[in-house]
Structure formats: C-alpha cells, structure tokens
Amino acid sequence: MRRFLALFLAIAAIAVGSERQKAADVTAAVSLAPVQKVRVVRSYPHDPQAFTQGLLFDGGFLYESTGQKGFSSVRKVELETGAVLRIYRLAPSLFGEGLALFGNKLIQLTWLNRKGFIYDKETFRLLGDFAFEPEGWGLTLDGRRLILSDGTPELRFLDPATFKETGRLTVTDGGLPVVNVNELEFVRGEILANIWMKSVIARIDPATGRVKGWLDLEPLVRENSGGDTDAVLNGIAYDAKGDRLFVTGKLWPKLYEVRIE
Ligand SMILES: [Ca+2]
C-alpha cells in the first residue's frame, strides 16, 4: 500500500508540474485513476543497445524505432530471438522517435528535426518525408488517425495520408494535465502511453483524454534499468490478432509479453 501511495504521489507530482498553484486550488477534485498490476506471460531477448523510442507488432514481427544521434534506426525484429532482421540507419544528425504503421507504410518521427519519414514496411525503402510541429515523441494509429505525443499533455490527431492535424486531446488525471506523455499504442479502444521517466503506463480514454488507469511496471524497470537513468520504460506494442501486449524499455535486455491483472 505504501508503494502505491508513493506511486500516486509521483503521478500527482508530474501532473501538477509548474501549475502547482492552480493545482492546489483543485486538489479537492482530484481522484486519481486506479493503479493496476501486470503479470509477465513471457520474456524475450531485446537488443540492449537499442534506445527504444517506438515499437509496434505486425504480421508476427516487431518493428522498432531507436533514438540517439548516430544510433537512430528503424528495425524489423524477430520476437522470439530479438534478432534484427532488417535495419535502416538514419543520418547522424537525426534522432529517431515514435513509429506507427499505416497500411504498408512505416511512419517514423524524429525528435527535434520536425521531420518524419515514411518507409515501405517490406523493403524499408524510404518513400518520403513530411513536416510536423513541434516535437516528435510517440506515434500510433487508432485505425484511421495517427496519434502523436510531444512530451506535453496534448495529443495531436493527424491524417495519416496528409499528416494534417485534425484534432487534439489533453491527457488528464483527476482533472490535472499529465506531462511527458511518450511512446503510444492503441489497444482495444484505449491509448496506452509511456510516461517518460516513470515506471507506469497510462490507459487513456481517446474520447476525453482522461486516464482510466495506471499500469504499474516498476518490477520490470528495476530488473532492466541497471541503475542507468536513461534506461527507462518505453515501448508498447500490441498484437491485435493474438491479443498480446508487449512492453520494453530503452537499452533493456528484455522485452515482455504482459497481461493486465
Ligand atoms: Ca507503440
């Protein structure tokens, strides 16, 4: 219970941020979403050099975007072995971020370059690029719209064909904005989101932006971070056909199939 309380306070702290004064005024209205545990179904090897920024699952394989200048890439990864089957390396000036799939196209964000890239899923041939604002953090597709995070509580919806913004959503918990919203995955009608530097995943209602629950992945963070503050939880993929949820982190040696308890 004590650990849950600490977690609640940690979440409350991120939510409050610089709006502490304003937040204090609405404290009475705060009712933080419940914290849920996850069960590890199976673990798999993950490249401990991969600074994971985007992750998705399609057709039996993982697709991963990695960051850091000089180390950014898009990869096709074999789930069982973690082997990199195909790789596209970005120019050293670019920092890879979120990754989504639209049809047969992989769409990758970069962090501060205000540029995204489109690749053929099979060949990894670069098909084109697009401009977006302001920063690129996470990316997923809800079936018809791209959802982009930029580290603020705001999620942007983009048309996946034109990359034009079609709407926004503010992520809140207990009426307070949640900052540092990072890697995303659309799962069974909810937006799952990593929160940068936190060992929780938010389950966000895509209609209201409200956090419906927090998945506590602290035991996995402890097992994989090795005390490295960069080695944070980041990477959510969903196998819709097999109803399997995968999570990993930056520089983590393992990737997990997890089930929400
Ligand atoms: Ca994802």
Image: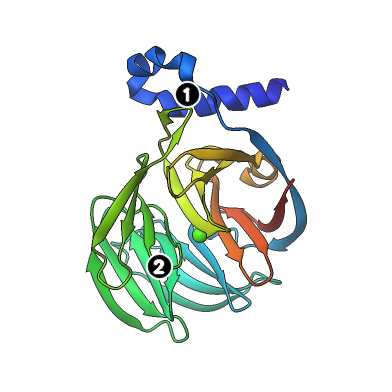
| Up/down of 239 relative to 8, above or below | below
The residue that appears at 53% across and 66% down in the rendered structure is 56
Crowd class of label 2 (few under 14; some 14 to 19; many from 20; radius 10 Å): few
In front of the other: 161 or 248: 161
Left or right placement of residue 248 versus residue 108 in this view: right
The residue that appears at 24% across and 68% down in the rendered structure is 130
In the rendered structure, find residue 13 and report the number of the disc placed on it. 1
When asked about the image quadrant of residue 85, the answer is bottom right
Q: Quadrant of the N terminus?
A: top right
Q: Residue furthest front?
A: 207
Amino acid under label 2?
Arg
The picture places residue 131, in percent across and down from the top left corner, at 22, 64
| Up/down of 217 relative to 114, above or below | above
Left or right placement of residue 160 versus residue 10 in this view: left
The answer to whether residue 199 is seen in the rendering is no
In front of the other: 74 or 42: 42
The residue that appears at 41% across and 16% down in the rendered structure is 26
Amino acid under label 1?
Ala
Q: Are discs 2 and 1 less than 8 Å apart at CB?
A: no
Q: Residue furthest bottom?
A: 123
Left or right placement of residue 216 versus residue 133 in this view: right
The residue that appears at 61% across and 68% down in the rendered structure is 240
In the rendered structure, find residue 144 and report the number of the disc placed on it. 2
Is label 1 within 8 A of ligand 1 (CB to nearest ligand atom)? no
